[in-house]
Amino acid sequence: MKRIFWLAVLLGGLAACDPGKVFEENVPIEGKNWRIDEAVHFKVLVTDTVSTHNIYVNVRTFSDYPYSNLYLFIHVTSPAGDELTDTVDFRLADDRGRWLGRGIGDLYFLQLPYKKNIRFPVKGVYRFDIEQGMRTDLPGVRDVGLRVERVKEPADGKKE
């Protein structure tokens, strides 16, 4: 009985560790080679149009990824059908070639800020389509993800 209690406490604690997370999903890239014609798709249900949110792109690469950056085309479609396309350039390594982010062995994880302190204008399902824009297939990409989180409000009510 004590084991069941402590297991329940542990699982409850793990679930509460990320209270601001609205959405997070990572999609494996087939063959760990992101083809130029392959997009990654996410559907995010938004129910809060009052709070501000941050949106991140998650990227997991192996050390044999051949570049220090990653160009992405991010297409967002709102529930109302409005479309937005952004081109972003994310740095994955510093000027000396050292990988940024966290690493284990030859695998590196980065959570890259895409949009900060935004409000979704309408409730519903938003579609995010992410394409790589490097003009060639990209070996060494394990997975690509999207994270949406609610911005934590400080006690004084001012945004961080």
Image (tube, rainbow, N blue to C red):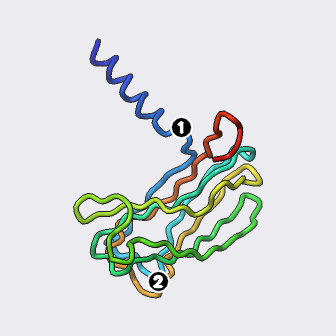
Badge 2 density bin: few <14, some 14–19, many ≥20, Cα 10 Å: some
The answer to whether the residues at label 2 and label 1 have Cβ atoms under 8 Å apart is no
Going by the picture, which residue comes out furthest to the bottom? 135
Q: Position of residue 156 (x, y in %)?
A: 69, 35
Q: Position of residue 91 (x, y in %)?
A: 45, 72
Disc on res. 19: 1
Give the amino acid at mark 2.
Answer: Met
Give the amino acid at mark 1.
Answer: Pro
Image quadrant holding the N terminus, namely top left
The residue under the point 66% across, 54% down is: 117
The residue under the point 34% across, 17% down is: 5
Is the residue 135 above or below the residue 88 in the image? Answer: below
Q: How far separated are the C-alphas under marks 2 and 1?
A: 35 Å
Q: Which residue is mark 2?
A: 134
The residue under the point 65% across, 40% down is: 153
Element carrying mark 2: loop
Question: For residue 127, what is the image quadrant?
Answer: bottom right
Badge 1 density bin: few <14, some 14–19, many ≥20, Cα 10 Å: few
Q: Is residue 156 left or right of residue 101?
A: right
